[in-house]
Amino acid sequence: MPDTSAATGDAMGRRGFLARAAGLLAAAGGTVAAAVYGAAVGYPIYRFLMTPARRAEALGAVKQISFPVTDLPPVNTAKMFKFGAVPAVLIHLPDGSFSCFNAVCTHLGCTVQFEPAQARIHCACHGGVYDMKTGANVSGPPPKPLTQYTVEIANGQVSISRT
């Protein structure tokens, strides 16, 4: 039977319906693909641009933390913990004193580790070495020392604060 709908203009034929449906599906698929591509490109750019502001906000939010003396590390060991949003390291030095630093390498932002056998703070990413008492950059690529925090022990509590 011949298709007379095009000649009379009263109803869309099967071919016309399928062509329009395929066109709508293609347009919807293109829109979704464009949205996914935009998110894939835009999100890393957003994170890159917003990171300094968030980092400054997170650093400014926490000025001091406290924990019980029972959580102190034994002599010649270290305790890693979060000081706000950044890692920090509390070192119980062989002479019984304490030193505490921001545990983020000043070279490229890797997390540093305390190495008691070598009496140093070491960044395994690029071989940076820091002094365990002062946080001064001793060797390797780090351009500046680790940020030092103040450690105070009183009334059964250890308080660590920004200098």
Image (tube, rainbow, N blue to C red):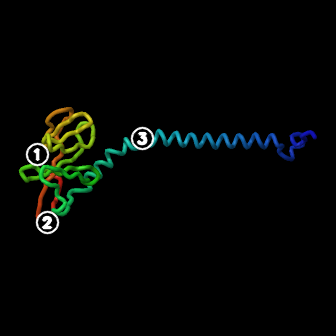
Q: Marks 1/3: CA distance?
A: 38 Å
Query: How far is mark 2 from mark 1, CA to CA?
Result: 23 Å
Which amino acid lies under the numbered mark 1 shown in the image of this protein? Lys
**Mark 3 or mark 2: which comes first in sequence?**
3
Q: Given this view, does label 1 or label 3 mark the residue nearer the observer?
A: 1
Picture coordinates of residue 10, whole percent (x, y)? 87, 47
The residue tagged 1 is 133
Residue 160, image x and y in percent? 17, 56
Horizontal side of residue 75 vs 67, given as left or right: left
Q: 88 above or below 143? A: below
Pointers 3 and 2 in contact (CB under 8 A)? Answer: no
Residue at the spot 66% in from the left edge and 40% down from the top edge: 26
Q: Residues within 10 Å of mark 3 (few under 14, many from 20)?
A: few
Residue depicted at x 65% and y 41%: 27
* Residue 44 percent coordinates (x, y): 42, 41
The residue furthest front is: 117
Q: Closest to the observer: 148 or 110?
A: 110
Q: Amino acid at mark 3?
A: Pro
Secondary structure of the residue carrying tag 2 is loop
